[in-house]
Image (cartoon, rainbow, N blue to C red):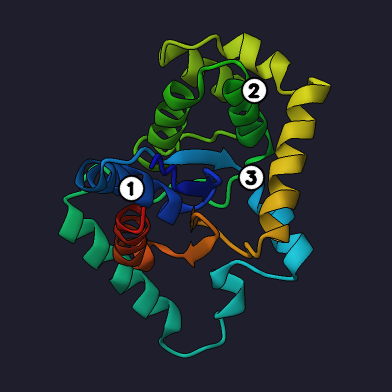
Amino acid sequence: MTLHPEFIYDFGSPNAYLVHKVLPRISAETGTAFTYTPCLLGGIFKATNNRPPMLTFENVKGKMAYERKEMRRFIEKHGLSAFQFNRHFPVNTLLLMRGAAAAQLDGLHEAYIDVAMRAMWEESEKMDDPQVFVTVMTAGGLDGAGLLARSQDADVKALLTSNTASAVERGVFGIPSFFVGDEMFFGKERLSQVAEEIKTQLNAH
């Protein structure tokens, strides 16, 4: 059986970066390759009436402090010392995610993801600035100007819209989310469950 677990992502989520750095270990452990699906987190929030944690829990005493503690624990556990919180946060990721859709269509997805994740969550770049976007992508070995232009193409916009709508239809309300077959999981804290479900489904066939 060939199983391709799916990772629903948007570069605006720091937890998406943290997950991205850990997924190769799960792939090696399970012998599976994750399919990355770019979706617009803002579109997911709008469609599901969800809000970012900093707004949802801003008046809950101790909640955000605990969330930060959990993030530190995850970073330490997995040795992700290159991570730094983007000083421009929140960054509007529409350009980045359209670029991801373009890269997906044009066979450049994996390289694009690595460059964008590093720029957002290691180098603290302001990736909603078109000039910064072009500079970063070009420095990463991609055609920055070409990607910027491509982000305005109808097929690129349609793919990102379709990906986002499909994710919501399947029950996604936030990022990072995962699918193993029809089973959905949300949050970096569920990675062990994702790995277990992969093994369960592989063993069932």
| Label whose residue precedes the other's in the sequence (3 or 2) | 3
Q: Residue at point 38% right, 57% down?
A: 201
Residue 154, x across and y down, in percent: 83, 23
Residue type at mark 3: give it.
Cys
Secondary structure beneath label 2: helix
Instruction: Examine the image and state in which quarter residue 63 appears.
Output: bottom left
Instruction: Examine the image and state in which quarter residue 47 appears.
Output: bottom right
Left or right: 133 in relation to 17: right
Q: Residue at point 57% right, 52% down?
A: 90
Residue type at mark 1: give it.
Gln
Residue 97 sits above or below residue 43 on the image: above
Residue that mark 1 sits on: 84
Foreground mark, 2 or 1? 2
Task: Specify few, some or many for label 3: CA neighbours under 10 Å numbering under 14, 14-19, or 20 or more.
Answer: many
Residue that mark 3 sits on: 39
Q: Out of 5 and 18, give the one closest to the viewer.
A: 5
